[in-house]
Each structure stands twice: as C-alpha cells, then as structure tokens.
Image (cartoon, grey):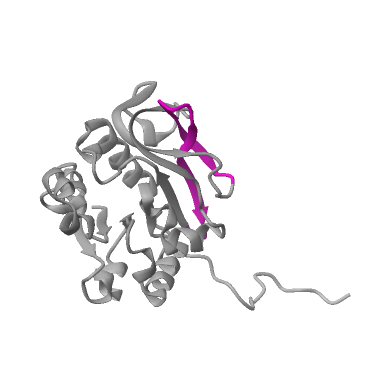
Amino acid sequence: MVKVTVWNENRHEFKNPVVREIYPEGIHGAIESFLSKAGFETGTATLDEPEHGLSDEVLQGTDVLIWWGHLAHGEVQDDIVEKVKQRVLNGMGLIVLHSGHYAKIFQALMGTSCALKWREADERERLWVVAPGHSIVEGIGEYIELEKEEMYGEHFDIPNPDELIFVSWFEGGEIFRSGCTYTRGSGKVFYFRPGHETYPTYHNEQIQQVIINAVKWAAPVKRELPVYGNATPLEVIGSK
C-alpha cells in the first residue's frame, strides 16, 4: 500500500476564520481525508511539530509527500529541506500544491526562483487538460472549472516541465502552466496549481481525483537504486 504524508504549514487555519471555516481540520486534514478514503495509508505533518513532522522515520516510511505552504516558507529548516531532497532523489514522490511553488524544497529541486504573477479577485479558473493520455488526468474531462480561485500568471520561472498536464485560463485573461511533472534522480515531482486557502478547492471532487491520480503516478518504482562511484568491471579487460 502506498504511504502518503500530507505536509502543511498550518498557519492560515489559525490566523483566518474564513480558512478555518472551510478547512476545520486544516488543509492537510482535508487532503488526508480523501486520500485515506481512496485507499492510501496516510499521515500528516505540520510546520510547528518537532522537525516539522518530518523525522527520519517519517520520511523513510513515506512513498509520496504532499506539500502545501504559503506564509512561512522561510521558517522551514534547511537541514529538513536537504533530507526531503535526498529522499526525492532516492525515489520518494513529491506533489507540490499551489503556493508551494515558493517552498524551499521546490526551489531546490527546480534550481530557479519559481516566481510568477498573482492576483486575488475571485476569478473563474478553467484548467485545460493538455495531456489527455496521461494517468494523472484519468477520469477527468476536457477541463476542470473552478468558480473562484486566486490567479497565477505567466511567466512562471520554472524549468521546462518533462510533461505539461494542465494549462489554466483565468477570467482576467492570464494563462498559466498549472500541472507540471519532473523527474529528479529516481523520484517524480508533480506541481499542481489550484488550492488558495480561502476557497474550497480541495473539496472539489475533480481536484481530489487529480491528486489521487498524482499519488499513484508519483509512487516509487520498486527496484534497486543505481550504484555510483568506482566500479569493478563486469568482464575481463584484455591487455593490448
């Protein structure tokens, strides 16, 4: 069974009553709930726990880590970021949601600023599926429409994705690369844009389905990791 850990800084839920009303168990609790119902073994971790809830034991037991952050990217300890990065390089899947584009772990794996344009104006968002044969969009139609969301606009300062899954259109006219996959070492990374804290985006069944599909896609491949360094020859090397 795939083990998923949902990480959330868990700050908006205490600062903003609107967020608390939408997500009474926290954003991490809402995501953990639908993933658990989908059959995954699930757990949560938050910023203010010791080691941000990401101890060696938790990370070693995690197949896919989901990351939501916004207010407190700078408070995430660099040594924890490095541990998460190494786990990704060794095969753990990582799903970065919404404002996690500025998370230290995403920037570390992308090697760019991950900056973008944004606007909060209760805009309609239409996420167009541009890779209809991809497993991440199984069960999804031509697009997902969200009545209200925060706008993210191009240019999005990320490396060219391995695969582009969604492109968003917003009511104000902008577009955005909203679903991007990457391979880093032996691990798979998926960035998925929707999920501003003051909107009930993670209660949307289609958004939930994408995240469920992404967990299945990002789960580690069960195989031995590559061996690096000085190597003994497999065959006898003849002298010339």
Q: Residue furthest right?
A: 240
Q: Nearer the viewer, residue 167 or 232?
A: 167
Report the magenta stretch's main SS: strand
Question: Is 212 placed left or right of 90 in the picture?
Answer: left
Answer with the quarter of the image where residue 208 lies.
top left
Q: Is residue 164 above or below residue 59?
A: above
Residue 224 appears at what percent x and percent y?
45, 64
Residue 187 is covered by the magenta coloring: no
Q: Residue at x 44, y 66 (%)?
A: 85
Q: Nearer the viewer, residue 137 or 70?
A: 70
- How many numbered dots are placed on residues in this image? 0
Question: Could you tell me if residue 14 is visible in this image?
Answer: yes
Q: Residue at x 63, y 76 (%)?
A: 231
Residue 160 appears at what percent x and percent y?
59, 45
Residue 52 appears at what percent x and percent y?
27, 71
Residue 93 appears at what percent x and percent y?
38, 55
What are the residue bounds of the magenta stretch? 160-186
Q: Residue at x 38, y 36 (%)?
A: 136
Question: Is 236 placed left or right of 179 in the picture?
Answer: right
Question: Could you tell me if residue 97 is visible in this image?
Answer: no
Q: Residue at x 28, y 70 (%)?
A: 54
Q: Nearer the viewer, residue 77 or 232?
A: 77
Q: Residue furthest top?
A: 142
Which quadrant would the C terminus be assigned to in this image? bottom right
